[in-house]
Amino acid sequence: MSLIVAGYGVEAKPNMPVGVSHLANGVLIFGPITRSAEVRNVALVPKRSPTAPVERRADDRLGGDIYSSGENDTTYLALGVGMTAYEPVLETFRTAGRSAGWRLVTGDYEVRWPARFTLRADGNTDPRRWPFELSLDGSRDHFLYLHGPFDGARIPTVEQLVAPEMTIVLRGVVGTAPFIELAYERAGQAWRQRNYWLRLDDRTAYVMRAQSTLEMRDAMFGGSDYVARSFRSASAS
C-alpha cells in the first residue's frame, strides 16, 4: 500500500509507521506513530503552490534549514530540532501539481483530509485491516477508516453491518455515497457509528466506518462526511 500526502503544490511520501497531525491552520506535523526518546519530526507549511523544484535552503527567519523552491510565500518543509534531513520521516518530498487542501492518495483512491484529524498509518497491508485511520484531535475513540476494496457480491450489505445491539437511527446520502448511522451503548455511554459505501467504479466499493460518542457526533461526522464527499479513484487525478 502506498500513501502520499498531496496538496498546495507538493507531495510528501511518509515512511511507515507514521503519525501526522493536521492543525487547524493547515500545517502538517509528521513524526513517529509511537512515543520515542528520539524526537524526529518535520512540519509541512501550506502556502502558494511552488513552480520550481524544492531544495534544501537555510532560512534565517526560522533559525534552521527548510526545503522550498526559493519563491516567496510558497509551501515549504521545515526540519524539527536536531533534524539534519527529512529522510528519517519522509521517503520523498517534491513539487507536484495539486490543488489547495490536503489529500491522502493511495494506489486506488484519493480523499480530502479534514483539519483537526490526525493520520495514523502503521504500514500493515493485511486486507483484513485498514492502511490508515483519521482520528479527531488524535483521539483513540473518535476515528474513521476505509476498508476494502470489495467486489460485486462481496460488498457488505446493510444487514451485515448492523450488529444485534445496534439500531439504525439515520439513513442518508453524502455526495454520491449512501450511509447508515447506528446507535448503541458501550460501558453505559451512548455511541454512534456511520458506515458509508464509497464506489470506486461500477463493481468495486470501499466501506468507510466512523465512530464517536454521542457528545462528539457532530464534529466527528462532519469530518467523515467531508471525506466521503471527496472520495474518488486515484486514476481520475
Image (cartoon, rainbow, N blue to C red):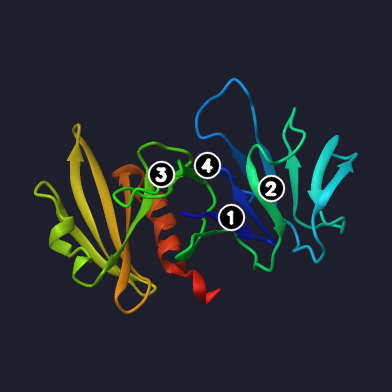
From this view, report whether residue 128 is shown above or below residue 98: above
Asked whether, in this view, residue 59 is left or right of residue 155, the answer is right
Q: Earlier in the sequence, mark 2 or mark 3?
A: 2
Q: How crowded is mark 2: few (under 14 residues within 10 Å), some or many (20 or more)?
A: many
Q: Mark 3 points at which residue?
A: 124
Camera-near label (4 vs 1) is: 4
Identify the image quadrant of residue 100. bottom right
Q: Which of marks 4 and 3 is nearer the N terminus?
A: 4
**Kind of residue sitting beneath label 2:** Leu
Location of residue 107 in the rendering, given as x and y in whole percent from the top left corner? 48, 63
Q: Distance between the residues labelled 4 and 3?
A: 9 Å
Q: Mark 4 points at which residue?
A: 16
Instruction: Find residue 44 and name its label.
Output: 2
Marks 1 and 2 in Cβ contact (< 8 Å)? yes
Tell me the quarter of the image containing the C terminus.
bottom right
**Kind of residue sitting beneath label 3:** Asn
Q: In the image, what residue occupies the spot 75% across and 27% down?
A: 82
Q: How far apart are marks 1 and 2 (CA)?
A: 10 Å
From this view, report whether residue 28 is shown above or below residue 207: above
Q: Distance between the residues labelled 2 and 3?
A: 24 Å
Asked whether, in this view, residue 135 is left or right of residue 52, the answer is left
Determine whether the residue tagged by mark 3 lies in a helix, strand or loop: loop
Instruction: Find residue 5 and name its label.
Output: 1
Q: In the image, what residue occupies the spot 23% across and 41% down?
A: 190
**Kind of residue sitting beneath label 4:** Met
